[in-house]
């Protein structure tokens, strides 16, 4: 065990999981690459959990941070804050939500907590609908809408949460149905839950593509069908775009746009990629809902000038270089390569995803049984080959998660696919 590993274990809580038998210390990065403390270079296909959105050490972002830090680091929301207003204006107009208001937080968890506070206050109800297999954060409120046992440390809850089907296409009781029947079955399940629970519901919260849950998603249009049912009852729709926002899915700028027939969500939460590593989260929503609180509410650090300057520079770079288009093109090529690679592997159950959000689900060959040990082995082998990837999925971590910065080049996609092919061969070789 390295000294830093031992010190980490001694001073930080046991539940703070680390990747790899010998955990990595990443010391610097550039573009799509990072280096560890021993000087090894890796192609980064996980971006610190989908957070390095454009590139490591992007000069515009680094410069914006340094310049803003040289002027003023903090003032609080009690004073006018130009970079915060500018970023809020950009996000409001990109959100697709009419007359939108934006509130900044420091994390995705806090963004979802704010959305829960807003929706429950607006609707005067603590009943929430969430998706099975969901993940929305680590706080007391976020954990209580998390449909994934591995990330639910307590069942105590400030909310009455009811879980509905639909987030996982390839498993569960409706997996064998075709897309239209699957959607109909999930809508029927939603009606059933609404009928059984009685009372008023505040909102349904959903990740358009489930992140921690293993990059699973419903057929396009499912959330639009849900929305029609919800709208009849005045129930709000919260899209958690913490992983899916900013063009990561390639086809769309927001994940909800794959379900756009019934209009935009009432509230949309974001975090991770927008700050490229600076801690920005937030919620954007209809003014009527955003303005419903009748007591003060602030975030001391939310919208801090340095993070906002970074977010503005990062977003400008993303839009100017059409990184959504890049995610679509390079992601399309990458998933094709990975499908070809995995076609030879009996331990791969499914390769799925959209844009630069690609999941590879591993099972014991010839069965439907998840194989988390295989996933851990592939991670180790990929690292040995010079590639960092992530993992996730349901109640057992058996899905490889691939989510590089959105500036990934074709050459890097090819290189990463080749490393992963070798890693799969090594890790899934029959004993
Ligand atoms: N929502 C989703 C969909 C997430 O993936 C995450 C983080 N993995 C969160 C919320 C929580 O974000 P944070 O870790 O910044 O609190």
Image (spheres, rainbow, N blue to C red):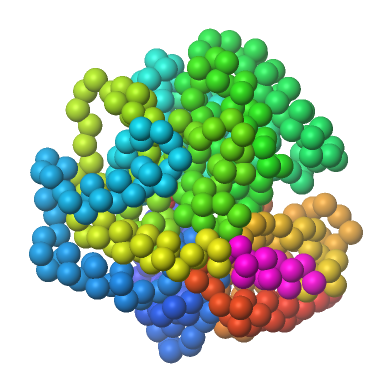
Residue 392's spot in the image, x, y percent?
Answer: 61, 56
Q: Where is 204 relative to 387, above or below?
A: above
Tell whether 398 sits left or right of 270.
right
Residue 320's spot in the image, x, y percent?
Answer: 41, 66
Residue 65's spot in the image, x, y percent?
Answer: 23, 67
Determine the residue positioned at 66% across, 29% down: 225
Q: Where is 229 relative to 281, above or below?
A: above
Q: Where is 97 relative to 199, above or below?
A: below
The answer to whether residue 139 is visible is: no
Pick whichever, 308 or 107, lies toward us. Answer: 308
Tell whether 60 sits left or right of 76.
right
Pick whichever, 282 or 197, lies toward us. Answer: 282
Main secondary structure found in the magenta portion: helix
The residue sitting at the top extreme is 199
Q: Quadrant of residue 403?
A: bottom right
The answer to whether residue 388 is visible is: yes
- How many numbered badges does the structure rendering display? 0
139 is within the stretch colored magenta: no
Tell whether 280 sits left or right of 34.
left
Chain part drawn in magenta: 327-340
Q: Quadrant of residue 78?
A: top left
Tell whether 277 sits left or right of 201.
left
Residue 154's spot in the image, x, y percent?
Answer: 49, 36
Determine the residue positioned at 82% across, 52% down: 368
Pick the quarter of the image with the C terminus.
Answer: bottom right
């Amino acid at each position: 065990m390295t000294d830093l590993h031992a010190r980490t274990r001694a001073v930080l809580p046991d539940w703070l999981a680390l990747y790899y038998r010998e955990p990595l210390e990443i010391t610097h990065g550039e573009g799509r690459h990072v280096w560890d403390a021993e000087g090894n270079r890796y192609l980064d296909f996980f971006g610190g959990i989908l957070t390095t959105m454009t590139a490591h050490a992007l000069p515009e972002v680094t410069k914006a941070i340094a310049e803003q830090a040289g002027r003023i680091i903090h003032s609080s929301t009690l004073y006018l804050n130009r970079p915060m207003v500018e970023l809020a204006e950009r996000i409001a107009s990109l959100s697709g939500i009419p007359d939108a208001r934006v509130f900044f937080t420091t994390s995705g968890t806090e963004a979802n907590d704010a959305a829960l506070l807003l929706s429950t206050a607006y609707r005067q109800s603590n009943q929430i609908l969430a998706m099975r297999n969901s993940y929305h954060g680590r706080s007391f409120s976020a954990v209580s809408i998390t449909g994934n046992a591995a990330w639910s440390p307590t069942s105590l809850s400030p909310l009455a949460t009811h879980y509905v089907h639909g987030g996982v296409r390839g498993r569960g009781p409706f997996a064998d149905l075709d897309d239209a029947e699957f959607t109909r079955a999930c809508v029927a399940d939603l009606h059933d839950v609404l009928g059984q629970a009685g009372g008023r519901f505040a909102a349904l919260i959903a990740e358009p593509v489930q992140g921690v849950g293993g990059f699973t998603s419903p057929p396009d249009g499912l959330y639009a069908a849900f929305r029609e049912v919800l709208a009849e009852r005045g129930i709000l729709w919260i899209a958690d775009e913490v992983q899916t926002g900013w063009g990561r899915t390639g086809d769309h700028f927001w994940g909800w746009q794959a379900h756009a027939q019934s209009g935009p969500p009432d509230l949309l939460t974001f975090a991770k990629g927008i700050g490229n590593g600076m801690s920005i989260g937030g919620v954007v929503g209809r003014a009527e809902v955003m303005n419903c609180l009748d007591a003060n509410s602030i975030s001391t650090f939310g919208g801090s000038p340095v993070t906002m300057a970074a977010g503005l520079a990062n977003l400008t770079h993303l839009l100017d270089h059409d990184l959504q288009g890049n995610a679509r093109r390079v992601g399309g090529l990458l998933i094709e390569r990975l499908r070809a690679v995995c076609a030879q592997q009996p331990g791969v159950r499914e390769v799925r995803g959209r844009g630069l959000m690609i999941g590879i689900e591993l099972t014991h060959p010839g069965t439907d049984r998840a194989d988390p040990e295989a996933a851990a082995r592939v991670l180790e082998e990929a690292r040995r080959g010079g590639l960092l990837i992530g993992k996730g999925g349901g109640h057992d971590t058996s899905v490889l998660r691939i989510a590089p910065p959105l500036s990934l080049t074709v050459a890097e996609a090819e290189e990463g696919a080749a490393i992963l092919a070798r890693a799969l061969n090594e890790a899934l070789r029959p004993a």
